[in-house]
Image (cartoon, grey):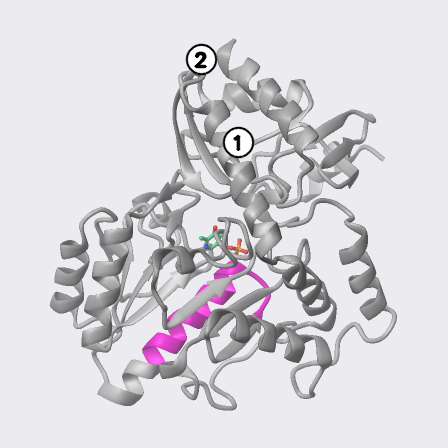
């Protein structure tokens, strides 16, 4: 079976794939269909939190697989209840809605904000202010929420009620909230797909203070930044804010599809039976995977994430061919003199998987990547960037 030709023939051409077919892996090592090995600094875009076929995660998932794979949300199941309790007790949030992806987690966040506002203030207070250069997903509403014009073509009409503010000017956000009688402000704290740009702390605090006074909800999209990625369980902790809604997905279940929308005090009773739902959301297997992942993201692991982040920053900052390094924790963007495309190709050739984000090279290694793998991969990356 030739994977590449079958895929090219039958899978919809929505992706420009690299000419590589991965077949297996272990930890931070990947193997392709020719037997070539790679060190993985991409984790399938921040999904494989503890690397590939991690034994602890694998056991948690396969134990659940042997018991009950699905029951539907008509009934109670253990793993999703346990996961919801873990998420709330560790974030200060009050309720969780489970779905299957980042876009769905954001849909749920937007719907919750509009429902809250509708019930309290009636019609006409439905606009969500999002940020320019953001990315919130590929459904029609989350494309609309995405503050990049390139995503707003060809699929129209798009859902209304999104306006885009300057990600460096808090006054612009405040002005748009007032002008549009907005119900919520939604942002990523590190704009991931937009090029790994962390927002300034002052900016975020100013907006957080303003929205609190105005009963406008603060939605933080932690689909990519969440679950230990930035060196805290959720990035909002490092900004000293308490959001009303937090969405997450990617790394939550360590490689299985799971989205979560966490709802704070104000929204604890907004959703009532019948107002929102998902067939697969909170699936027992994905939830069991997530319980295992979250239970391992403790202070020691997070300190290690921050130490590895410092190592990468210090190795790359000022290195030959590097223009700049940005990011938080193990979510890192590298502006290089060479094009990101050439750096990625050079690294792939030499057995290191790295990603791009807009014009930058992006690193999203496993949170537990062994130091010797990280050193070797960064060494190769530096050589490729310098060539
Ligand atoms: C990846 C991503 C999404 C979309 O997640 P999907 O699981 O692909 O739907 C939304 N927001 C952010 C910040 C993301 O990084």
Judged from the image, the secondary structure of the residue bearing numbered disc 1 is: helix
Q: How many marks?
A: 2
Judged from the image, the secondary structure of the residue bearing numbered disc 2 is: loop
Horizontal and vertical percent for residue 182?
22, 70
Query: Is residue 214 left or right of 105 when viewed as pictured?
Result: left
Residue tagged by mark 1?
311
Horizontal and vertical percent for residue 359?
40, 29
Which tag is nearer the camera, tag 1 or tag 2? 1
Q: In this rendering, is residue 135 above or below 113?
A: above
Residue 159 picture quarter: bottom left
Q: In this rendering, is residue 383 above or below 183?
A: above
Residue tagged by mark 2?
320
Q: Is residue 110 one of those drawn in magenta? A: yes
**Does label 1 point to a residue whose CB lies under 8 Å from ligand 1?**
no
Residue 344 picture quarter: top right
Q: Residues within 10 Å of mark 2 (few under 14, many from 20)?
A: some
């Amino acid at each position: 079976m030739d994977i590449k030709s079958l895929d090219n023939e039958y899978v919809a051409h929505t992706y420009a794939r690299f000419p590589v077919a991965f077949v297996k892996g272990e930890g931070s090592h990947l193997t392709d269909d020719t037997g070539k090995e790679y060190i993985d600094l991409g984790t399938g875009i921040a999904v494989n939190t503890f690397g590939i076929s991690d034994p602890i995660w694998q056991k948690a998932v396969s134990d659940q697989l042997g018991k009950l794979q699905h029951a539907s949300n008509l009934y109670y199941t253990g793993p999703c209840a346990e996961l919801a309790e873990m998420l709330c007790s560790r974030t200060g949030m009050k309720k969780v809605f489970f779905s299957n992806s980042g876009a769905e987690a954001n849909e749920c966040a937007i719907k919750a904000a509009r429902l809250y506002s509708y019930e309290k203030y009636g019609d006409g207070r439905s606009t969500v202010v999002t940020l320019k250069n953001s990315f919130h997903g590929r459904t029609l509403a989350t494309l609309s929420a995405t503050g990049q014009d390139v995503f707003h073509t060809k699929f129209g009409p798009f859902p209304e009620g999104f306006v885009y503010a300057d990600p460096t000017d808090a006054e612009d956000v405040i002005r748009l909230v007032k002008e549009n009688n907005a119900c919520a402000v939604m942002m990523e704290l590190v704009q991931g797909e937009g090029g790994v740009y962390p927002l300034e702390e002052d900016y975020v605090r100013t907006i957080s203070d303003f929205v609190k006074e105005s009963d406008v909800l603060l939605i933080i999209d932690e689909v990519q930044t969440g679950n230990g990625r930035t060196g805290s369980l959720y990035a909002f902790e490092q900004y000293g804010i308490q959001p009303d809604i937090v969405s997450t997905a990617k790394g939550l279940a360590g490689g299985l599809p799971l989205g979560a929308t966490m709802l704070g005090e104000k929204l604890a009773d907004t959703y009532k039976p019948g107002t929102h739902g998902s067939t697969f959301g909170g699936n027992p297997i994905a939830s069991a995977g997530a319980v295992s992942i979250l239970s391992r993201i403790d202070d020691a692991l997070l300190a290690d994430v921050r130490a590895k982040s410092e190592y990468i920053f210090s190795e790359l900052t000022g290195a030959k061919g590097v223009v700049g390094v940005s990011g938080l924790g193990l979510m890192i963007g590298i502006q290089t003199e060479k094009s990101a495309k050439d750096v990625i190709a050079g690294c792939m050739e030499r057995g290191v998987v790295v990603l791009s984000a807009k014009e930058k090279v992006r690193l999203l290694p496993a949170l537990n990547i062994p130091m010797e793998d990280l050193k070797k991969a960064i060494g190769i990356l530096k050589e490729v960037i310098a060539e």
